């Protein structure tokens, strides 16, 4: 399961409204090869379920995760920070053995 913090939920709702997304839109969280640690997170709005997707809902946010990415993302919490140490979405992934300083790349 992938979850979102209250702060991340509020930012997702704000961005959905700003970008004109409908209530059918959720977020797609995926893992792709690349980045300085070997794997990278990909986060985008999506409204369509693909055949191999797992769908979660947390705090009213629909979360799409493809079957391959789910292996890397089980237990991950999506957070948002706009503090001095950086601004943006952050992944708190208990499966990551190493993360990059940018927070967008990890290894298992």
Image (tube, rainbow, N blue to C red):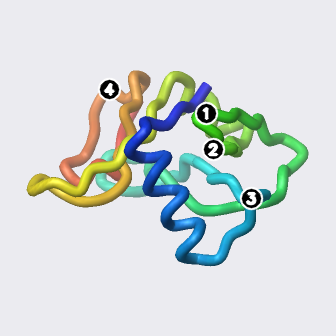
Q: Position of residue 85 (x, y in %)?
A: 12, 53
Give the Cα distance between marks 4 and 1: 25 Å
Q: Measuring 56% from the left and 25% from the top, which residue is drawn there?
A: 74
Which residue shows up at 74% across the image and 66% down it?
Answer: 22
| Residue named by callout 2 | 61
In this rendering, which labeled residue sits more in front, label 4 or label 2?
2
Q: Is residue 28 above or below residue 2?
A: below
Marks 4 and 2, how far apart at CA: 27 Å
Residue 2: give x, y in percent of width and height. Answer: 57, 31
Q: Nearer the viewer, mark 4 or mark 1?
A: 1
Asked if the residue under mark 1 is in contact with the one under mark 2, i.e. CB atoms within 8 Å, the reply is yes
Q: Are marks 2 and 3 in contact (CB under 8 Å)?
A: no
* Local SS, label 2: strand
Mark 1: few, some, or many residues within 10 Å (few <14, many ≥20)? Answer: some
User: Which residue does the numbered mark 3 point to in the structure image?
Assistant: 23
Marks 2 and 3, how far apart in space?
9 Å
Looking at the picture, does residue 25 appear above or below residue 1? below
Q: Residues within 10 Å of mark 2 (few under 14, many from 20)?
A: many
Q: CA distance from mark 4 to mark 3?
A: 35 Å
Q: Secondary structure at mark 1?
A: strand
Disc 4 is placed on an element classified as loop
32 to the left or right of 65: left
Which residue does the numbered mark 4 point to in the structure image?
97
Q: Which mark is residue 58?
A: 1
Q: Earlier in the sequence, mark 4 or mark 3?
A: 3
Name the disc covering residue 86, or none: none
Quadrant the C terminus occupies: top left
Q: Quadrant of the N terminus?
A: top right
Asked if residue 72 shows in the view, the reply is no
């Amino acid at each position: 399961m992938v979850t979102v913090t209250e702060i991340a939920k509020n930012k997702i709702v704000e961005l959905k409204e700003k970008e004109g997304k409908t209530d059918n839109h959720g977020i797609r969280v995926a893992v792709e090869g690349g980045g300085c640690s070997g794997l990278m997170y990909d986060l985008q709005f999506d409204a369509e379920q693909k055949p191999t997707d797992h769908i979660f809902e947390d705090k009213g946010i629909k979360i799409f995760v493809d079957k391959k990415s789910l292996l890397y993302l089980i237990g991950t919490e999506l957070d948002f920070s706009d503090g001095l140490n950086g601004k943006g979405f952050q992944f708190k992934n208990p499966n990551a053995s190493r993360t990059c300083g940018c927070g967008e790349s990890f290894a298992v």
